[in-house]
Image (tube, rainbow, N blue to C red):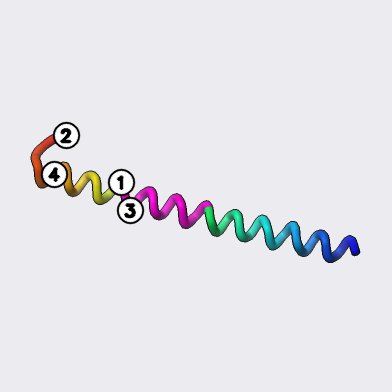
Amino acid sequence: MEKMMDKRAFADEEIMAAFLSIEIAYFYILMGKDKKEQEKTGTK
């Protein structure tokens, strides 16, 4: 029973880490798009 719980906790941690990295990547992509849009319009 203990091994099953450990496995499940580990899987949850991996899923959370994957979600976090996806969110961070998405955030950087959005920030990059915002910067490009601002350069086009000439505003800072």
Q: Secondary structure at mark 1?
A: helix
Residue 4 position within the rendered picture, expressed as x and y whole percent measured from the top left: 83, 65
The residue under label 3 is which amino acid type? Ile
Q: Which residue is mark 4?
A: 39
| First in residue order: circle 4 vs circle 1 | 1
Q: Are marks 1 and 2 in contact (CB under 8 Å)?
A: no
Q: Main secondary structure of the magenta part?
A: helix
| First in residue order: circle 4 vs circle 2 | 4
Q: Secondary structure at mark 3?
A: helix
Residue at 9% x, 42% y: name it: 41
Q: Are marks 3 and 2 in contact (CB under 8 Å)?
A: no
**Mark 2 Cα within 10 Å, few/some/many (few <14, many 20+)?**
few
The residue under label 2 is which amino acid type? Lys
* 42 magenta-colored: no
Q: Which residue is mark 3?
A: 29
Q: Which quadrant of the view contains residue 2?
A: bottom right
Q: Which residue is mark 2?
A: 44
**Mark 3 Cα within 10 Å, few/some/many (few <14, many 20+)?**
few
Q: Which quadrant of the view contains residue 7?
A: bottom right
Instruction: Decide if residue 33 is on the left or right side of residue 16.
Output: left
**Mark 1 Cα within 10 Å, few/some/many (few <14, many 20+)?**
few
Residue at 55% x, 59% y: name it: 18
| First in residue order: circle 3 vs circle 2 | 3
Q: Which numbered dot is residue 17?
A: none
Q: Are marks 1 and 3 in contact (CB under 8 Å)?
A: yes
Q: Over which residues does the magenta segment extend?
A: 20-30
Q: Which residue is mark 1?
A: 31
Residue 13 position within the rendered picture, expressed as x and y whole percent measured from the top left: 66, 55
Vertical order, 44 against 17 (above or below): above
| First in residue order: circle 1 vs circle 2 | 1
